[in-house]
Amino acid sequence: RLVVQPAGLIAATPTPVKDGTPPDNGAGFGLKIFTGDAGLASPPCSACHAVGRAGVGPALAGVATRAATRMEGLTAAEYLRQKVLEPRAKVVEGWPAIMPSFQGQMTDDQLKALIAYLMTLE
């Protein structure tokens, strides 16, 4: 199984969590953000998305592969970042434009970790 890992996505300095310990700022920490186990105030991605089945939002199995083809000129990681920060910039056909923007609701390190996790979902 090939795991897509964009270069430079994990290089940022980790942001300490509430108890002062640095998190795993890679895909493992991104999974915690996705599921709501990271202690962020914003709703978790899993409130609307699942990996293997559609919920309120599309299923995310294969999202890294699909993201690579969504917008010309954007890498898969860049597209996913845009979807989290500006979800209405490109609405996927067949889905309502209901995803909220998470702009300002997580640090850049947290966003990079979330994207690192999403990039493992090929």
Image: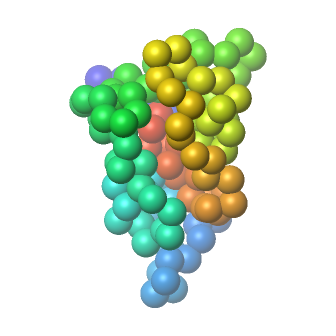
User: Residue 52 is drawn in which quadrant?
Assistant: top left
Q: Nearer the viewer, residue 96 or 21?
A: 96
Q: Quadrant of residue 77?
A: top right
**Residue at the location (53% across, 40% down)?**
99
Splitting the image into 4 quarters, where does residue 90 fall? top right
Q: Is residue 7 left or right of residue 45?
A: right
Residue 24 appearing in the image = yes
**x and y percent of residue 58 in the render?**
39, 28
Percent of width and height locating residue 88: 66, 32
Residue visible at 36% across and 36% down in the picture: 56
In x, y percent, where is residue 11? 63, 52
- 30 on left or right of 8: left
Please identify the residue farthest to the right as the structure is shown.
73
- Percent across and percent down for residue 92 are 54, 20
User: From the viewer's perspective, is 30 left or right of 104?
Assistant: left
Residue 77 visible, this orientation: no
Q: Quadrant of the C terminus?
A: top left
Direction bottom: furthest residue: 19
Task: Please say if 101 is above or below 86.
Answer: below
Q: Answer above or below: position of 118 versus 23.
A: above
Residue at the far left: name it. 52
Quadrant into which the N terminus falls:
top left
Residue at 50%, 70% in the rendered image: 41
Q: Say how many tags the image has.
A: 0
Q: How is the image coloured?
A: rainbow
Residue drawn at x 49%, y 68% as measured from the top left: 40
